Amino acid sequence: MERFRKMFGAQDMTVGKPLTNLTMFAVPLLIGNMAQQLYNTVDAIVVGKYVGKSALAAVGTAGPILNLLLLLFMGISTGAGILVAQYFGAQRREDLTSAVGTCLTLTAIASLFIMIVGPLITRPLMTLLGTPDDVYDMAVAYLNIICIGIIGTGYYNIVSGVLRGMGDSVTPLIFLVVACVLNIFLDILFVTQFHMTADGVALATVLAQGISAVLCLWRLTHMGDTLKITRASLVPDRTMTRETIRLGLPSGLTQAIFSMAAIVVQSLTNSFGTSVIACSVVVMRVDGFAMMPNFTFGMAMTTFVGQNVGAKRLDRVHEGVREGIRLGLIISVVLTAAILLLGRNLMELFTREDEKDVVELGVHMLRILAVGYIAMAVTQSLSGVMRGAGDTMTPMWVSVITTVIIRVPIAYGIAYFTRSEALPHGTPDSLYISLLISWIMGALITTALYRRGKWKDKAVIVK
């Protein structure tokens, strides 16, 4: 009972068994990430079942552009998480409060920017991607609503990241589950009762994430024993702003690179037609759940390493790395096996009975990707270690190499050389064979760079 109670507060990972620290932190975080993924999954299920594959394709086509718009939050969140973890580990309350207050203000500025710029660029980007006519208007409406309500998404991601940096992964989970249930209810209400399409699920998502953001902010302002947010602390500190940008910029650039590459690949996907676009949406939703353990243990490793670096307990880092990778691999293998066994059932959740072509293609694509999930467990865990130590550049360059230099050329190359009269744009398999190759290469490159040990040179940013 005492252990369970401690999960609801800031968790000190500089003491105790690393495996216990990682498990107590990662389990609620994993559930939370699953709930986060459920947002997009329910959106896809509702529009796929009640509207059809055109609406499903609209949500998917909007995805890469939405991720591009969110890159500002990615950078702030990463920088804030590292600073918070290390200041918390060093027990420097004043610096911790300053870092958090600065990040809250930066989030407000980023939100305002996206709310203004986002709706201005959605139509040009949809046109640039060659979006099919039956998908175009729904995709634009979806993106515009998300952009206008982006402040809720931004603050939830930033504040939950701050809470996790202090070792509290349970509170954001509780608030996220509440918002997730609300999102499901609103999705069904807007689409089935108000007869909305992609715009309905966008509105539901914005409202639900706004609720989760308010709850997280409430929690943050009631942590007086750890930090105290005041008006003065919300004034951006120049040093904290610089450090947040320095640490978060590589992750923000990585997100930008991922998003630009995804937009390029989305253009290739769009050339295959609405059925392939819809299939890709479903595969990526299932893929999101398979990836959750990998992202979760990467985030857990960042917090664990960050706190121990802050406390100058580098002796605990290596033990934590071994335990984290082992745990991540076990869970990833189990989930991958489940997806292979239940792939057809999962695909059928998203489609109507008269759209079996989407199901068959999706099952085939999942089989191509299967081994890659295990490789990503290694990549994400070791990247988390490097970020927690303060080396955010190395994971960025690995992402650049695997996404831009490896995946995009291979995808277009396979599509080009498989063109035929039956397949004028090549085989859709190119989308997923290229992704699998990039994942495997990423694991090999990240492992080599971790063993090289250069990340240890940046292991102390808290002086």
Image (spheres, rainbow, N blue to C red):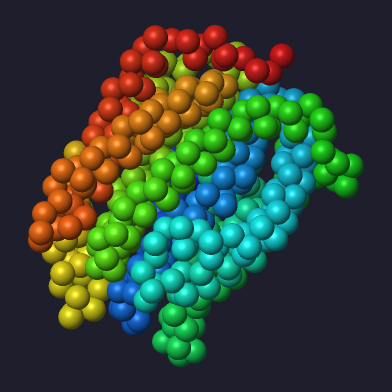
x%, y% of residue 291?
A: 34, 45
Q: Residue at x 82, y 38 (%)?
A: 236
Work out whether 105 lies above or below 316.
Answer: below
Is residue 231 shown to the viewer in this render? yes
Q: Is residue 172 left or right of residue 45?
A: right
- Judged from this view, the residue extending furthest toward the right is 232
Q: Residue at x 64, y 48 (%)?
A: 159
Q: Residue at x 54, y 9 (%)?
A: 457
- Judged from this view, the residue extending furthest toward the front is 421
Work out whether 155 lies above or below 91.
Answer: below
Which of these two is toward me, 273 or 228? 273
Quadrant of residue 59 in the image?
bottom left
Which of these two is toward me, 350 or 13? 350
Quadrant of residue 56 in the image?
bottom left
x%, y% of residue 285?
A: 33, 58
x%, y% of residue 183?
A: 50, 71
Which of these two is toward me, 1 or 153? 153
Q: Quadrant of the C terminus?
A: top right
Quadrant of residue 322 in the image?
top left
Is residue 212 shown to the viewer in this render? no
x%, y% of residue 69?
A: 57, 52
